[in-house]
Image (spheres, helix red, strand yellow):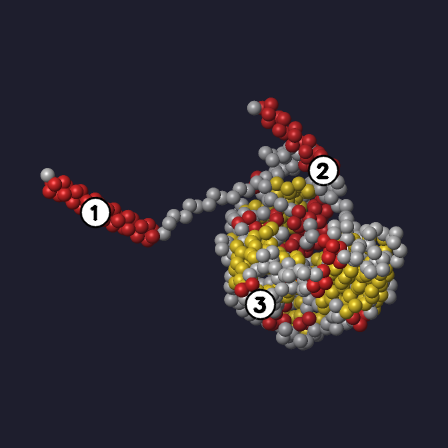
Amino acid sequence: MKKHLYNYKIILIALFILFFSLKTGWAEEEKQIRIIEKNNGYLQYIYRVNKDIELRGVLAESKWYFDVDKELEVIDFRFNLFLRLNELIMKDISYITVYMNNIPVRTMKLKDKDDELIKNWDIQIPDNLINKGYNELKIKTYSRISYSPCDDDENIANWVVVDRKSNYVITYSKEQIYDKISDFPKPFIKKYGDESMGIGVMIPQKYTEDEISAALTLIAHMKEYKQGYNVKTTLFRRGDYQISEFESMIYIGNFNDVPDELRNIIKINTKANKNDGYIYRGELEDSNKPVFAIISDKGKSLINAVKALNNTELKAQMIDRHMLIPWDFNTRIKEEKIDDYIYLKELGLNGIEVKGRNQQVTSIGIKIPFNEVLANEANINLKFRYSDNLDYEKSMVSIYVNGKPVGSKKLERDKRDLDEFKAYIPKELRRNNYYDIRVVFEMIPDGIITCERYLASVPWAYIQEDSSFFVPKKERSLMLLEDLPYPFSKDNDIDITTIVMPDHPTKEDIEIAGKLAELIGIGVKNNEGVIRISKGAYYEEKYKNLNMLKTPENYYSDNLIIFGTPNENSQIKAINNSLWFKYDEGYTKILSNEKIELLPQTSQQSTFVELKPSPYNDEKGLMTITSLNKQSIIDALYYFKDDKRGLLLGDAAIISRNGDLLNFRFQKEAPKPIIEDNPLENKNTRDYIMFAGTVLVFMLIALILYLYKNQKNKK
């Protein structure tokens, strides 16, 4: 037995070495989107296709979508299109057309010479065709390899490839159109250059607990507005950075510590109550950069003002550049009716039309709170109609959820004016927070007599706005990294969370706390919850006389996030026995456990992340991010970015200094209780069985007496 155990450990170590030597985790692949700030103040937005796109058949198309913010003006749009062509394409009857918002811009021959296999065009798109908001760039190809278009449409040799080098470049000028408090978080959340410092959130050098709590809660609330934007946000103490380093600035704190650069926007009556909350919007005098300030000498008023900004109805009334929020003002969002039915029209979709031959696809996205999973009976109920030019023996509709098929239905001629299809979401797909629902129509044209009729036939289907999604929900049973920000976010709100910083927070620690606040803020729409702050050594005598971070005992009933090295954060030592990856007695290395044997370099240089029920309150969560190497912790936050967070799985992770990730699962699903049948139903069933049994007994006795009597009469 010991020999087998030894061999098992050797295999684990070998696999571990192999995993950590495969690649460098921090190596960035080529970015699909780049934004460059030019010397003249213009923004250059570059989108790269990055993956080859195959266009097959006679008629084919590809689309790209982009948004133009209201404060941006398109100066120039260039589409750099690279195509790879197969050698069979006929040069005189094969074309490509470029469209902007369904308006043709330019048509070119796919080939000018028979031996051309690569083509490149630099196409200027007129800026008057580009809208504010949503835009569609599209290419359509008409590709022929013979004089029989129907054969060409089915021939596997008829292809064109949009090369991954293709890109479009938009040059914008910036306009200043947002200047009221009600516009917040515009113009702070917007397109910034990749090298920009973005938004700075400043707190006083000697901040109070409420001041940093208000700042962290604001950062969390702003996160929901960042969808589609890559905006760097840095939390810092006054003096850690220069205000001029940032493109926009937010100050949260008391009146005495307002920096000189922001005093020009402060307007307050000398008799005003400085314990109320005051919100200001302005610009820096020397650079015209946007500035926002939330100021009060009473910490709770700062938090109340932050909550007011995340109440849409209240914020809409803040049409000036300065606003008073009384310290006792009710900022609670009026409760909205929560319904398990979501209709298409509630998603802003007044029906969906799909048009075209063969396979046509449309997608719908549904989000549910991070702390919940779908319950039994969750389903998708489509109501739709379709054209009458279909081959109903071959045409059908299918539903896919997150890439997995969940049901299909044939289209029927007698239901073409109103059809309905309900598909249930299977158990294995009900754990997600986001559901990509893909509806796939296979619309095969009817009566293909001639090639021309086939190419001219354009079937359609229309999904009605009263189609619905039934999404009954229940609480998650485990706290897992793939479900972050749960348990720190519940029911689309912050679930009160305390971030425990190192005993003597540094500039880097303050920034880490700000990044963790962004994690907590994902999906937050309500405004009741707050993020509180503590330090590992709050209990030490030397801190008791300070007005900073004196953490009440009841904070231990919160969700907790503790980060740092054991030498810098005393709370890491305090909870060491609750960790799966424990430190040794001298706090010089992480110990191996039943899951893995750790090499010395790994135990001393890697970062260990764990998520579990809190040892102080098992209904709340505890996340620890710890290492003996401070820089390793800073680097490990890479995996909390939006596009990387999905790589974290299970309830524990090791992140090497090189950025390689290894996931673990320690928690197990609790055995589900056996739900007994309804006692009333049981009683009714017993009564029925007893009654039926009695009747059968009497019938049997009667039968025996009858037979006995007949037998006797015969004798």
Give the image location of residue 352, x and y in percent. 62, 65
Marks 2 and 1: CB-CB under 8 Å? no
Mark 3 vs 2, N-terminal side: 2
Closer to us: mark 2 or mark 1?
1
Label for residue 465? 3
The vertical placement of 365 against 596, above or below, is: below
Label for residue 699? 1
The vertical placement of 265 against 87, above or below, is: below
| Residue in view at x 60 percent, y 54 percent | 400
- Residue underneath mark 2: 20
Give the Cα distance between marks 3 and 1: 60 Å
Mark 2 vs 1, N-terminal side: 2
What is the quadrant of the N terminus in the image? top right
- SS type, badge 1: helix
| Residue in view at x 73 percent, y 44 percent | 25
Closer to us: mark 3 or mark 1?
1
Give the image location of residue 648, x and y in percent. 64, 46
